[in-house]
Structure formats: C-alpha cells, structure tokens
Image (cartoon, helix red, strand yellow):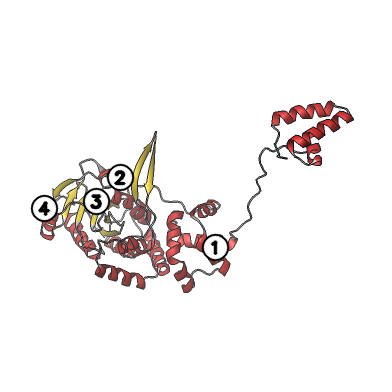
C-alpha cells in the first residue's frame, strides 16, 4: 500500500470531525485515516489529537560533524600564512604546499586532521571562516579594480599585442602621498604580466622620469620571461622620449590607454588595489629610508605572491537580463601558469624551478610580517 501524506487542510478538517465524534465514529475515522495515509495507528491518533506536528517533508536532521576544532585551528593558521585569500584560491595553495609544510613542522596536526585538510572543499572552508571574524581589510584607496577592457592606442608596434603570451605587461604608478600632494613623496611602480598575473613592484622617491625609467629597467631584469610589450596610462612619467626610444631600441611594443579611461589597464589596476594598497596602506612615505624599506618589502612579497598565492583570471562576461555573470578560470599561481605555458622556454622554466626549490613560504611570510611591522612603526609626518 502506497503512503499518501494528507494535506494540511484535510488534516484540520479531520481533526474537527474527530473531536466531535463518538467513540464508534472515532474508530471509523481513525481506520480510514490510517489506510489513506499509511501512518502507524498511534502516530495517526496523536496527529488527530493535536499531540504531534504534521510535517509534509521529512525532518531535517543535522549531518554528523566531520571537521573538528583541530581542523579549524589548522585552517586559520593556513589562512594567515596565505594572506587570507579566497577559499577557492586557498584550496589550490593547500594542494601545492601541504606536504611541504607538514615536513617542515609548520603544520602540526594528527593524521586524521591532515587528511581532512587534504579533502576539505572551498564551500566548507567558507562555512568555517564565517564562524570567526577575520582581520578586516584596510579601506579602499584611490584606485579600484577596473572591468575587463582592452582597447589600446598604439604608439609604436614591433609585434602585435598578445595577451595570451607571457611577457606583455601593464604598468601603473601608485602614489604614497598620505592624502596630501604637497612636497615630494614616494611612488610605487607596479608592473603586472597580463597572461600570468606575475607582479613586480619598485618604490621610487618621486615620479620624475629618471627614477621611474630606472625602476622599470630593474623590474625588467627581475621578470621571469623576456619583456615583449608594455602598456601604460597617459602620465608624463611614462609618455616621454627616453622610454619611447628605449622600447624602439629593444624592440618592445609600447602602447598606452585612452585619455581619461583608467579601466583600459584593468590587470595592473586590480593589483594596485589588492597588492600595493593592501600591503603598505595609504600612509605618506617620503624619506629615503621609507623607499629602501618599501623595496625590501616588495622584494620579499613578490616572491611570496608570484610563487605561492594562486590567482584567478576573468575569462568572459555574460549578460543575463540585468545581471552580469563573470566566468573565471581555475586558480593557479603565476609560477604554475608560467610552467604550463608553451610560450615559455625550457631554460626559463628551469630557472623558475630552481628558484622555487630554494624558497620557504613560512620564512617569506615571517619576513614580510617583520618588514610590514617596521614600516608601520616609522615616524611619518
């Protein structure tokens, strides 16, 4: 006999009849109700007497707890190590680093806890993170991430701009004025590879062309692949004869965004907000010791960011009615993206692997925290 759960309206009407019926009539009503619903006689009686709540759906019982307090503590230790990145990016970082961190003794968990960390999903990580307040981000600065636009006005072109090939970069200058434009103050040259997200930063004492050009040539030496193209905004620190002649001599494609269109450089604009501002904040830096300390911090953070922090790249945008749905690729570190790129030479890949083998993410994070604390402790007018 199939069981058909009665509707709420039917049960309310039946309860009224049952309450007013004689003993013989109650027996007949109960018999019919048991046959119709398939309920046990005692449960049916309790429903008709109002002693139990009628549920149309099965009771939702909470699942057994899988992840323990040990797992939560280990997860937040990993979050701190990887700069509180998103759960999807953290999952990839854990895949790459868990065995190494356990061997080093940084991750001290039981075998069961280690197995939990190996299989925990990004959605479960999100639920655990929601239970505890995380360090708040500093306020957003003057530059925010832009939407994905790429209409360039070429100045000189020796090769077609190719976003699918590593070596084409966007660059931007981030001010450290502290909200006051009076006098000289430091800037950060931020350079981001469009294809891989590889980011290099260099602090300069001011935005004079000579300092910015010297910083760019130094950044070029630190890039893991040959520089093929640079793209900038229309600032005078970039649009000048010296840089143009340099690009002509070195056969580097030089392009600039449209006047008044900051979103023409979305990749570096995003890193300006999520890396530079988040790392050093919005204070005023102006003395030589400030610039020197910034560059020490940037050197350590570039290794940390490029080799250990997975990033995502926007693949496409779909408009569904009034909503825009963004589709991202799978998270991967800039280092991994370079190793999997067919456009990177084997010699460059060998150098990258050799550098990665010498790095220790725990030591790098400790160095970054120490330099950040020194930067915050500086007396700044």
User: Residue placed at 54% from the left, 65% from the top?
Assistant: 115
Quarter of the image with the N terminus is top right
Q: Is residue 186 visible?
A: no
Say few, some or many: other residues with alpha carbon within 10 Å of mark 4 (under 14 / 14 to 19 / 20 or more): few
Say few, some or many: other residues with alpha carbon within 10 Å of mark 1 (under 14 / 14 to 19 / 20 or more): some
User: Residue placed at 30% from the left, 50% from the top?
Assistant: 267
Pointer 3 and pointer 4: residues touching (CB < 8 Å)?
no
Q: Nearer the viewer, mark 3 or mark 2?
A: 2
- Which residue lies under the disc numbered 2? 148
**First in residue order: circle 1 vs circle 3:** 1
- Mark 3 → mark 2, Cα distance in angstroms: 35 Å
Instruction: Report the residue that reaches farthest toward the right.
Output: 23
Which labelled disc corresponds to residue 183?
A: 3
Q: Nearer the viewer, mark 1 or mark 2?
A: 1
Between 202 and 130, the one lying in front of the other is: 130
- Which residue lies under the disc numbered 4? 241
Question: Which secondary structure lies at badge 2?
Answer: loop
Picture quadrant where residue 366 is located = bottom left
* Above or below: residue 236 compared with residue 114: above
Which labelled disc corresponds to residue 116?
A: 1
Pointer 1 and pointer 2: residues touching (CB < 8 Å)?
no
Which labelled disc corresponds to residue 349?
A: none
């Amino acid at each position: 006999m199939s069981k058909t759960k009665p509707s709420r309206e039917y049960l309310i009407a039946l309860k009224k009849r049952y309450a007013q019926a004689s003993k013989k009539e109650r027996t007949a009503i109960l018999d019919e109700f048991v046959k119709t619903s398939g309920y046990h006689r005692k449960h049916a009686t309790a429903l008709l007497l109002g002693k139990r709540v009628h549920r149309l759906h099965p009771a939702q019982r909470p699942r057994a707890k899988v992840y323990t307090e040990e797992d939560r503590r280990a997860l937040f230790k990993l979050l701190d190590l990887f700069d509180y990145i998103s759960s999807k990016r953290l999952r990839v970082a854990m895949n790459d680093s868990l065995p190494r961190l356990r061997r080093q003794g940084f991750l001290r968990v039981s075998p069961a806890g280690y197995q939990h960390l190996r299989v925990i999903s990004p959605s479960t990580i999100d639920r655990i993170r929601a239970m505890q307040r995380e360090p708040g981000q500093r306020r957003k600065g003057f530059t925010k991430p832009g939407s994905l636009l790429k209409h360039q006005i070429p100045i000189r072109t020796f090769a077609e701009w190719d976003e699918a090939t590593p070596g084409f970069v966007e660059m931007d200058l981030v001010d450290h004025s502290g909200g006051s434009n009076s006098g000289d103050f430091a800037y950060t040259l931020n350079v981001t590879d469009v294809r891989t997200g590889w980011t290099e930063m260099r602090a300069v004492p001011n935005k004079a062309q000579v300092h910015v050009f010297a910083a760019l040539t130094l950044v070029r030496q630190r890039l893991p692949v040959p520089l093929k193209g640079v793209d900038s905004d229309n600032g005078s620190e970039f649009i000048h004869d010296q840089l143009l002649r340099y690009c002509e001599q070195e056969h580097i494609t030089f392009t600039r965004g449209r006047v008044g269109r900051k979103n023409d450089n979305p990749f570096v604009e995003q890193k300006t907000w999520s890396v530079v501002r988040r790392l050093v904040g919005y204070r005023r830096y102006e003395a030589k010791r400030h610039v020197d300390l910034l560059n020490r911090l940037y050197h350590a953070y570039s290794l940390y960011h490029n080799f250990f922090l997975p990033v995502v790249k926007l693949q496409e945008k779909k408009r569904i009615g009034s909503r825009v749905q963004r589709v991202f690729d799978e998270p991967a570190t800039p280092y991994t993206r370079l190793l999997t790129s067919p456009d990177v030479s084997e010699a460059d890949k060998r150098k990258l692997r050799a550098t990665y083998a010498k790095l220790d993410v725990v030591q790098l994070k400790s160095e970054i925290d120490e330099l950040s604390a020194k930067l915050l402790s500086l007396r700044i007018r």
